[in-house]
Image: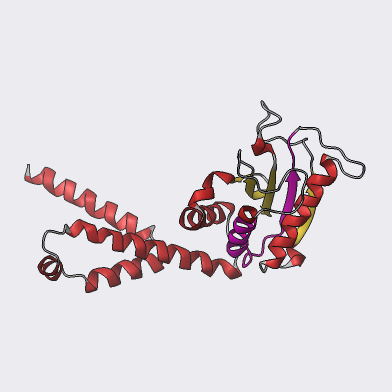
Amino acid sequence: MAYADFVTAMMAFFLLLWLLSMTAPETKAALSQYFESFSIIKSASQQSGTSILDKSTGVLEIVRKTQKASFRMKKEERATSEELAAMMRMAIDEKLQAMKKQVLIDTTPEGLRIQIVDNEGSEIFRLGSDVPTEKAVQIIRLVSENIREQPNRIVIEGHTDSAPFKTVQKTNWELSTSRASAARRELENNGVDPGRIARVVGYADQELLVREDPKDPRNRRISIILLQ
């Protein structure tokens, strides 16, 4: 039994070493600082009836902050699509929780794709208009804050649903293209270097997000792609 306990302890010890080796230096420094200044006895005397485990939220907050710092350190090097996706999801969870369903993030062979989609009753463009709504402006502003320091070139795509739209001078082709260009202007207004824009294109209803329902509002969207 003593030998079994010893083997278990050794396994736990080497698992701890492995986890520490996988942790970013900034995170290790923050955790070290936290535990150096935290006193179980002092905490218990000051907060009677409060679980010591409640302090774990402080550690989580430190880790979150150091993750952000780590992302900021990527300014001079090209972050991977997965790293950029994690950064965007974290920012959306913190600042755009109410509009979270309207921002879809995934990776494609081209790179990181951020799609800003319509929801029923929550549009990013008014019907037939290429002027972004306030919600779209907020989302694009947050996207800009998280990508403007990255070196990746950017592709902006405009998409519509299959509802017929045709006036004397405009069809879904022109509408999707003008919406993509409006998104480009918003990015540039929020500090994204115009020289990083690789192309701006409108696809009308030819690249549907919800193929089984061509008139689904989610098909009306803007795609912002950070190229590999």
Q: Residue lying furthest right in this view?
A: 168
In the rendered image of this protein, does residue 213 appear above or below residue 101?
Answer: above
30 in magenta: no
- Considering depth in this image, is 36 or 200 the residue closer to the camera? 200
Q: Residue shown at 92%/42% (left/top)? A: 168
* Quarter placement of the C terminus: bottom right
Q: Residue shown at 64%/38% (left/top)? A: 218
Q: Position of residue 84 (x, y in %)?
A: 56, 56
In the rendered image of this protein, does residue 44 appear above or below residue 87?
Answer: below
Q: Residue shown at 7%/46% (left/top)? A: 2
Q: Position of residue 103 (x, y in %)?
A: 58, 47
Q: Position of residue 144 (x, y in %)?
A: 63, 62
Stretch of the chain drawn in magenta = 137-161
153 in magenta: yes
Q: Residue lying furthest top in this view?
A: 212
Q: Residue shown at 73%/63% (left/top)? A: 196
- The answer to which image quadrant residue 46 occupies is bottom left
In the rendered image of this protein, does residue 146 appear above or below residue 205?
Answer: below
